[in-house]
Image (spheres, coloured by chain):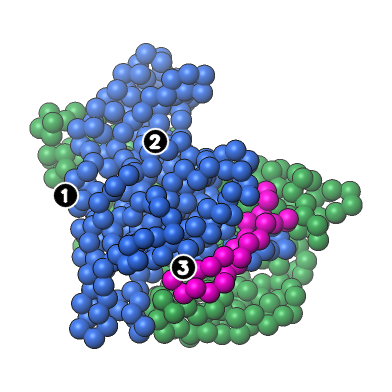
Chain colours: A blue, B green
Amino acid sequence: MNNKIRKAERLAFITKALVENTSKIYTLNYFSEQLDSAKSTLSEDVDLISKLFKAMELGEIRSISGANGGIQYVPVLSREQIEKEQLSLCKELMDPKRIITGGYLYMNDIFYNPEALKKIAKILATHFVDCEIDYVATIETKGIPLATVLAELMNKPIIVVRKSARLTEGPTIQMNYLAGSTKTIKTMALPIRALERGSRVLFVDDFMKAGGTAKGVIDLLKEYQVTVAGVGVVMSTKEPVKKLVEDYYSIIELEDIDEETGEIKIYPKKANN
Amino acid sequence: MNNKIRKAERLAFITKALVENTSKIYTLNYFSEQLDSAKSTLSEDVDLISKLFKAMELGEIRSISGANGGIQYVPVLSREQIEKEQLSLCKELMDPKRIITGGYLYMNDIFYNPEALKKIAKILATHFVDCEIDYVATIETKGIPLATVLAELMNKPIIVVRKSARLTEGPTIQMNYLAGSTKTIKTMALPIRALERGSRVLFVDDFMKAGGTAKGVIDLLKEYQVTVAGVGVVMSTKEPVKKLVEDYYSIIELEDIDEETGEIKIYPKKANN
């Protein structure tokens, strides 16, 4: 098959590789071997894919120069695509059926749905695309599927901060912290092997109220001599206005849940960093 | 752009959609609208992609007939690809540096790495491809990234069984169970809203020893009137030979970890169902 492969099939093959392993850098040599085609031909093919993706707003094909260079697919959204997703997420969450006794909002159907997660994760991937991170970190449990999908999009490993040390994970740094909204003392733990010193970490979570958990994770990560390159959450609350972490990106903002009337107020949040 | 779109670009566009949302069913009408092309032309395009994927063992393009029909990309592996992955996974895990005091094996770098997870999840997706499941279930915490990637490949929502009920998840069924290997009583919980009655669930986890956790989840799921359509784990132990669940699929088998000599014995496991 290889020596008869035509342009259309080359484009399908290259697109398949780039989209399947998002953000992974492929060399033209790799495609040249797989498709038995000249690099000059493949370079034209990649240009064609790149132009198509740009014209149809399907994300970016990027060229990375240098010794470890090559091409990668980066699933960034346009500003309009982000605004549309923000609105559709708000609309979906403002359904009164979501209200749980105690004034909480049921959101598992979104945070546990791969297609919905991918849309959300793409917004975060777009915002943090140039952060040059080494890991996507989260704390158990609800944020893990989101962190997984985002880590896939960014092609980086995940770090999961646990609520206590585990026998099966070896030596661990454990830390107590004050959960911001309830003022209770909680514990978090991270195995020493989980990440390399000197690396850059993006912390993500499903929800932020006072920011105590995010602050705790940032403090814990300091023990590993890493840089927290960004904090991203899906939904933050309007109150308290002053969070325990200063710099964070939130996709949408929860203003109020009225258990009695069933009214829920959620708005797209503007990025201020 | 749309009215000048050429064959090569149509193939790239269709491939991008199919591979990005694995197992999602796309109608030819959708592509016809997006690409402003006749369905007969697109049908030929899909045939071409299908043949290419088959010839290069990149997975299957399937046609689904009927009212909700269309085409989908199913990332199944060939028998040789599976055997190769099994061996490479065994080799990677038999590194003595992985041994943790107590005779455990450090595996987070694999279970928290998107590219490694995708390879593992594809083996499970291939094994369970015709199970017609509605959900991919797991229990917190370590199996969640695996369940997420598998759920993405199969385009189904995730169910995460918790170790205790949560305020934010509403009414929950909670159950005590006997952890098979340690004979201790543990708790698991699942929100009532988490899944629809009468559905089919695939349970996956990173590791199985006696099978107590898997049996617990199966028992808990019975309360929701669902069918457990399959149980899949990445690694099971050779001992005890008789597990608490009868029917399960395991990718590799752990025979022994010798803390003193650093010798680890792990083998590919043959499917017997």
> Residue beneath label 1, please?
B29
Quadrant occupied by the N terminus of chain B: top left
Q: Is residue B234 left or right of residue A73?
A: right
Q: Is residue B188 visible?
A: yes
> Residue beneath label 2, please?
A130
Circle 1 crowding by C-alpha within 10 Å: few under 14, some 14–19, many from 20? some
Quadrant occupied by the C terminus of chain B: bottom right
Q: Is residue B59 visible?
A: no
Labels 1, 3: one chain: no
Q: Nearer the viewer, mark 2 or mark 1?
A: 2
**Mark 3 and mark 2: Cα distance apart in space:** 30 Å
Q: Amino acid at mark 2?
A: Asp
Whether pointer 1 and pointer 3 mark residues with C-beta atoms closer than 8 Å, the reply is no
Looking at the rendered structure, the secondary structure element under dot 2 is loop
- In percent of width and height, residue B88 lies at 65, 42
- In percent of width and height, residue B83 lies at 62, 45
Q: Which mark is residue A180?
A: 3
Q: Is residue A228 left or right of residue A242?
A: right
Which residue is rendered at x = 67% and y = 48% of the image? A193
